[in-house]
Amino acid sequence: MSIVAPVLSVEHLTIRFGGLVAIDDLSFDAAPGQITALIGPNGAGKTTAFNCITGFYKPDVGRLSFHHPDGKTYYLERMDGFRIARAGVVRSFQNIRLFPAMSVAENLMVAQHVALMRASMFSIAGFLRLPGYMKAEREARDLARYWLDQTGLAQEADTLAGSLPYGSQRRLEIARAMCAGPKLLCLDEPAAGLNPSESHALNELLAKIRDVHKISVLLIEHDMSVVMQISDRIIVLEQGRLIAEGTPAEIRANPDVIRAYLGVEDEDELAALSVGVE
Amino acid sequence: MKAAAFRPNYAALAGEAGVAALVAALLAFPLLGFRLDASARGLALDVRLIWVVYAAVAVFAGRLFFALVVQHYGVRFVASFSRADLLPRYIPARLTHYASRYHVGAAMMAFAIMLPWFGFSDRNLIDKMTLILIYVMLGWGLNIVVGLAGLLDLGYVAFYAVGAYSYALLSSTFGLSFWACLPLAGLLAGAAGLALGFPVLRLRGDYLAIVTLGFGEIVREVIINWQVVTGGPNGLSGIQRPSFFGLELLPVASDGGTTFADFFGIAFSPDQRIIFLYYLILALALFTNLFTLRIRKLPIGRAWEALREDEIACRSLGLNPTMIKLSAFAIGASFAGFAGSFFATRQGFISPESFTFIESAIILSIVVLGGMGSQIGIVLAALLLVGLPEWFRDLAEFRMVAFGAAMVLIMVWRPQGLLSHRDPTLQLGKPVAEGKA
Amino acid sequence: MAYFLQQLINGITLGATYGLIAIGYTMVYGIIGMINFAHGDIYMIGAFVSLVGFMLLAMFGVTSVPLACFLVLIFAMFFTGVYGWTVERVAYRPLRRAPRLAPLISAIGVSIVLQNFVQLSQGARVKPLQPMVQGAFNVYNDGHFQVTISYLQIMIIVLTIVLMAGFSFIIRYTSLGRAQRAAAQDMKMASLLGVDVDRTISLTFVIGAMLAAVAGLMVTLYYGVIDFYIGFIVGIKAFTAAVLGGIGSLPGAILGGMAIGLIEAFWSGYFSIEYKDVAAFSILVFVLIFRPTGLLGRPEIEKV
């Protein structure tokens, strides 16, 4: 039991699609300033849970509490997706969703829309080029440049997002999410399709986000090298239910987890596999 | 790279052309081969089967010719017209630098400003250019909705009508001048945009198109039927003409006023009003253009484009799609309202016939043909779609068929529009070696 | 009561014609996700071709009304089918992978071409036809009003039911129907499994055009007068019917058609003729606001 309030509290989340129960009474916490991973075989309900948390689906049952560091609590199950993002929960997508006809830099500027809109006072300050707005825009550009540096995309600032190679697009999605000023960053399979060196760079980036910027991260991932190295805590789902939670070491040794992924019951095979996973 | 020269397979080509000719004959048979003549004695059938033969022969020849052209020049050459920017093929590489777009735009603007003073410009030409400029402005206005925000609006003419009728009613009921009515009419059109947009903007693309089309028709039917206010099918006449800041553009001043000619000490000429109207619409259109260019760089403009690209991603970043769509819709509607005011004051008379669906279709075609988002493209498309038919007014009968056929052909040939390049709204540039951003 | 019954009969008849046209819209939308803007004008072509057919038969001395109707039916369905096929081949197929607006503009162009082609070749004046199918049953009389159902109305309703039944059979039990349904659900997969998608789409357009031709024939007989502009308004109403019933659903198209026909009949009967088209559009707006998937449509879950 942690003394500090969790940043995200999922309680009794249940959602059905027609007759299919996609998630069944799921409850877990994500601690602040940590990286929490949601893993599980295909069809476990990970992305569905994500969609509930980020407002794309409305759960049938459950409470989703987001505790913002400034003290306010938001009940996500009732909120529109975009309001959840404004509250500080920003996500990326399994199938990358960039703005392909816009440049990398423009993508990052759109992420800062809310703050810039406020500064532009319904665009009037923008039209008149008032100093307040011009300052806000300069700061937005600086923030964009900062995250471009952090994700190694500084050279591509004016390239069309749609023409970037896959790995760069993945990094751009994270940079864009960070520009939106999240307190809880939700990443849906950020390592999908990345080669080992790119995965390694991703791990470093996530660690920096957690340690330097003190942003909590919730991620779905299949790539175990990323999950095991970077997560502070792992939640394991299978067929919509939670079957295990704990530190990477605990999960690695958990027989239920191994069985869920590999269908293996034999003790010796378990031991052999545990050694292999590093 | 030319296709390898080989003997074209004439038999196959002839076969293809033959099939096309057969289809043409089948199409022509019932409707070209016979004509229904309604007369006092009732309906009679006029047999003109020779037309079926003409149609078949024409299609056969045309298809064969086209196939031979493709064979001779190679498929890739012909297909290349569809890809890439159209202009760079024929202009040396140096000139297709980014800055050249500004040069072209500036040149066009200079030409437009100087137009009334050219030797070859007569009243007719200026009149036609005024009409084209109305459509350019409407195209630029609809571009905000369709090109920037990606909202499919098939009923844009409704806001044009609201602007025109608002202007007519405001100026005749309250006696306000053009410059006072113009913003009010725009505001009313914008309000109509908000009212119409609010319930329907969360609909998906194609559905939104049909609903907006329905709204356009509803507005037109209301205008036709609400005789008491709008004059019904007879329209409103006697709309106040604009004055040059209080100086009337008439031969003789009305009581208490001064005419333009008297004030400047020159002889009155009816051309003066034509030229004044021309500059008026030019100013309005340029205002629309500058507004668009500026707002694209502001957060709301970028939000429109981002929404067009991927609405779900926008939501995940905190953007409120409904508000953003509404703003595009309402602002686009306002510009149609301004254009409508100008239209009313230019004509002096408006009726529901000017606000049919075909107008919405033409404006939408101008935007799509021009290449969504391209300001210059829209000018070119307006010249093509509005200018050419005007010049071919003599061939009035075939005008519309050719117009429709041109729409189909241009879309099949270049579905992305004539000019499809998008200028980015900001440039961050590459980082300097010193590391300073 | 009697008046109500009469409007009911009128509405169902009208609804049948809208339903037949709506099927064309809904099938095309279901398979390639495109609103065939020119479909209303295909219906108009069907009406004109029917009229030409009748005149031709009269010239050849065919006097039996049932025989004439049957022959004209075949005649109109065939030629209108060719029009439908050609439109798809020329204006839509090349744009299958194009940005979404391009096929719509192309369709608008086709609509303009068809309308003006007919206007040029047949003249702009309306074409009246002497009433051919006359006679009616007296159904009910409540002292104030005589309710009748005419032979023509019966023919229209029966023909629609027969076509609907035949058509549903084809869709459900034949390989063509299976191919159609498969392509509508996942075009790429269907083609990988050997379905000739191009041919299936062409057939969809042809069938839609044929049904529209039937509607055109019926309207020609029913109203006795046609002009080149009838396609536009009827097209919008039929599309409204397709959306109302749930776009992509065949029974929905007929149901929607009935709904629109009834609304129009009752509105004109009890309120005023004036705003009756507005009534149809307003229905469309309401339906789309509150139930975007229509009456029988399946709700689409957003795939994130």
Image (tube, coloured by chain):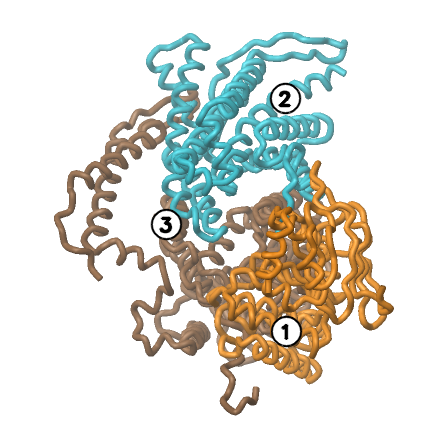
Chain colours: A orange, B brown, C cyan
For residue C176, say whether it is visible. Answer: yes
Inspect the image, locate mark 3, and give the three-letter code of the amino acid beneath it.
Answer: Leu
In this orientation, which residue lies closer to the viewer: B253 or B180? B180
In this orientation, which residue lies closer to the viewer: C299 or C278? C299
Whether the residues at callouts 2 and 1 have beta carbons within 8 Å, the answer is no
Image location of residue B419, percent across then percent down: 42, 64
Instruction: Name the disc covering residue C12, or none.
Output: 2
> Which residue is painted at 46% across and 61% down in the image?
B132
The 10 Å Cα crowd at callout 2, few under 14, some 14 to 19, many 20 or more, is many
The mark closer to the camera, 2 or 1, is 2
Q: Against A48, is B111 above or below?
A: below
Does residue A120 appear left or right of residue B49 in this picture? right
Q: Secondary structure at mark 3?
A: helix
Using the rendered view, name the quadrant where residue B162 is placed: bottom right
Marks 3 and 2 on same chain: no
Q: Secondary structure at mark 1?
A: loop
> Which residue is painted at 15% across and 42% down in the image?
B10
Q: Against B162, is C285 above or below?
A: above
In this orientation, which residue lies closer to the viewer: B172 or C211? C211
Please identify the residue farthest to the bottom as the structure is shown: B434
For residue B347, say whether it is visible. Answer: no
Image location of residue A29, percent across then percent down: 79, 60
Instruction: Residue under label 1, please give it.
Output: B246
Q: Earlier in the sequence, mark 3 or mark 1?
A: 1
Using the rendered view, name the quadrant where residue B148 is placed: bottom right
Q: Against A32, is C255 above or below?
A: above
Inspect the image, locate mark 2, and give the three-letter code of the amino acid beneath it.
Answer: Ile
Image location of residue B124, percent across then percent down: 41, 62
